[in-house]
Image (cartoon, helix red, strand yellow):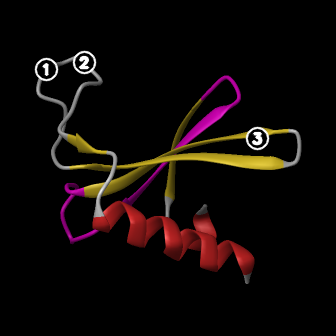
Amino acid sequence: MRNCGYAFENREGNEMSFARRITGRDYPRFHVYARTEGSTLIINLHLDQKKPTYNGSRAHSGEYEGELIEAEANRITNLKAD
């Protein structure tokens, strides 16, 4: 994921979290949860629009589909293929 411009955030079990800023600010940003199943990399991609509102909460204004998500998924796929 680092080769795709993402910064490592944390790891929980076999899942790692990465983020890529879109602007010079912390948000909005692309956010990825990645894990492997055998030799296959599974990526859960979404767009965080803003920081979680409540302390201790993981809830946020996230987008899980749409043109921006599709374009980013294609960008990652093309970079990983190179």
Which residue is depicted at the point 18% across and 63% down? 25
Seen from the viewer's position, the closer of residues 61 and 20 is: 61
Q: Is any atom of residue 24 visible in this view?
A: yes
The local secondary structure at tag 2 comes to loop
Crowding at mark 3 (Cα within 10 Å: few <14, some 14-19, many 20+) = few
Residue 57 is labelled as 2
Residue numbers of the magenta segment:
12-28
Seen from the viewer's position, the closer of residues 19 and 76 is: 76
Whichever of callouts 1 and 3 sits on the residue coming sooner in the sequence is 3
Which residue is depicted at the point 49% across and 58% down? 7
In the image, residue 43 above or below residue 72: above
Asked if labels 3 and 1 touch by Cβ distance under 8 angstroms, the answer is no
Residue 16: % across, % down:
60, 39
Number of marks in the rendered image:
3
In the image, residue 5 above or below residue 62: below
Residue 26 is labelled as none
Seen from the viewer's position, the closer of residues 60 and 26 is: 60
Crowding at mark 2 (Cα within 10 Å: few <14, some 14-19, many 20+) = few
Asked if labels 2 and 1 touch by Cβ distance under 8 angstroms, the answer is yes
Quadrant in the picture for the C terminus: bottom right
Crowding at mark 1 (Cα within 10 Å: few <14, some 14-19, many 20+) = few
> Which residue carries the number 1 mark?
54
Which residue is depicted at the point 36% across and 61% down? 69
Residue 36 is labelled as 3
Residue 58: % across, % down:
30, 24
Q: Amino acid at mark 3?
A: Thr
Q: Which residue occupies the extreme left position in the image?
A: 53
